[in-house]
Image (cartoon, rainbow, N blue to C red):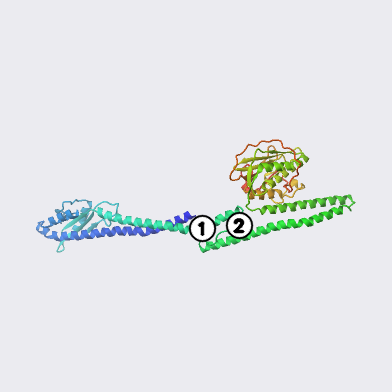
Amino acid sequence: MRRRLVISYLLLMVLVLMALETPLAATLASRETDRVRADRLADATRFASLAGPALRGNVPGPLSGELAAYDELYGIGAAVVDRDGRTVVVSPAWRTGPGTEAALETALSGQQFSAPEAVWPWVDGPLVVAVPINDGGEVLGAVVTATPADKVRRTVTAWWLLLAVIGLIVVLACVSTAFGLAGWVLRPVTELDAVTHEIAEGDRGARVQHQLGPPELRRLAASFNHMADVVSDVMDRQRAFVAHASHQLRNPLTALRLRVEELGLSLTDPEGRAEHRLALEETDRLALVLDALLTLARAEREENERVTVDAAELAASRVAAWQPLARHRAVTLRLCADGPAYARTVPTAVDQALDALIDNAVKFSGAQGEVTVTVRQVDGGTALQVCDTGPGMTPAQLDQATERFWRAPDAQNVEGAGLGLTIVAVLVDASDGRLTMRSGDPRGLVAEVWFPAPTDGTAPAAPTCPPTSDADATPADGDGSDGTGTAAAGVVVPAARAGGDGAVRA
């Protein structure tokens, strides 16, 4: 932007200089030519006054010596001709040419002649001047001089070079001033652009200095800061409301469940007992939703804090924690990793992402299914991939997988709140990570979350797949169900999907 402004200022200045200096250059050339022409006309007129007696008496007299001395002193050739065009007296350096012939014809007709009108640096040829010799109104002959124009051309060239130097100095001063002016005008815009990117990256405390630039941009910066404050306050209020509402609803929900449980002791009708069981299941489902909302609110309030974790170690811990549930559902759960794999994320991002992914994969793979968790270093970061053998998802379902409370049509009755992947999406986004989801071969889905590596980095290691030992641990709390039949994380944005591999940016 600054370059465009400077170029526009420079173009305008060049046009102004051309409009001013071009006529001035032509005027200087004409002025220098007129000065020399006036001197030559005066000299020719004096020679014409001396040539009158010589033409009448056909005796050169002092005219021959005058022309010779004039030629020797100034290097200017001159000649005197009679009315018939015959040469009477010439100087030693006199040479005839097309210009002298035209000059003599004009002078013999009784008029003065001079050419050219202006001496230009790129035009050769002498400055020719001719005057008639009159006696009582009768034209007796003519005097013609041919002045070399080299000195005039040098003088005109010097003037033009001076104008060019002055123009160049003015242009340089204009460029310097234009850069300063453009910087002063665009500095608030540049800072506004930088702060906008910082806010987009998650730094909601970034603000623009509103004391820079012209008044209009100062007002724009102040308005932007006010807008950022309002938006940040609204987001804080929204997240605080969700967190507080989820927390406050836990107590009455717990009390309601206890009362419903007590009512079950007095029910003897089989239909009543069935309704009582369904009521308890609904209260449990509502408790899961509230827990998920509280976790989501906390995740969205994560700032730019980053921690370095060993993703391979965390993956081993989470796989061990989910082994009991996998065995209970007859699902084979294994880990594929070799050596440490460090990632820089917001706190608990890897743990919660793996909990949601493994929960979904185990839940929807079905009996005799297989779930493989792979940790590897790739693209300057660490990728955690979860492969399952579930029913998979259609492309349309992939686009909606991380929407809040979304459930697949064939998983409406499966336990879960539909917020697990939304929570993971927020954590992945806060960690500057990304998500890739694609169909498995021959079935199921492959979901991969990628986190950037710490600045020092580690050498990538080829993963191997040793068998995992059983551990008496329990899965972490939290709901990872999205009803999709896959382990997946990340915000699925249709417009951001890469062609063919389902890559999306969380």
Q: Residue at x 55, y 54 (%)?
A: 194
Label number found at residue 146: none
SS at circle 1: helix
Task: Tell me, yes or no, if residue 448 can be seen here.
Answer: no
Residue annotated with mark 2: 205
For this orientation, the residue located farthest to the right is 268
Q: Residue at x 71, y 56 (%)?
A: 243
Q: Position of residue 504 (x, y in %)?
A: 63, 46
Please say if the residues under marks 2 and 1 sit with CB atoms less than 8 Å apart. Answer: no
Q: Is residue 336 above or below residue 162?
A: above
Going by the image, does 372 lie left or right of 116? right
Q: Position of residue 402 (x, y in %)?
A: 68, 49
Q: Position of residue 272 (x, y in %)?
A: 87, 52
Q: Position of residue 314 (x, y in %)?
A: 68, 43
Going by the image, does 113 lie left or right of 161? left
Residue annotated with mark 1: 187
Q: Which quarter of the picture shows residue 442? A: top right
Label 2 neighbour load within 10 Å: few <14, some 14-19, many 20+: few
Question: Which amino acid, by three-letter code, is at mark 2?
Answer: Gly
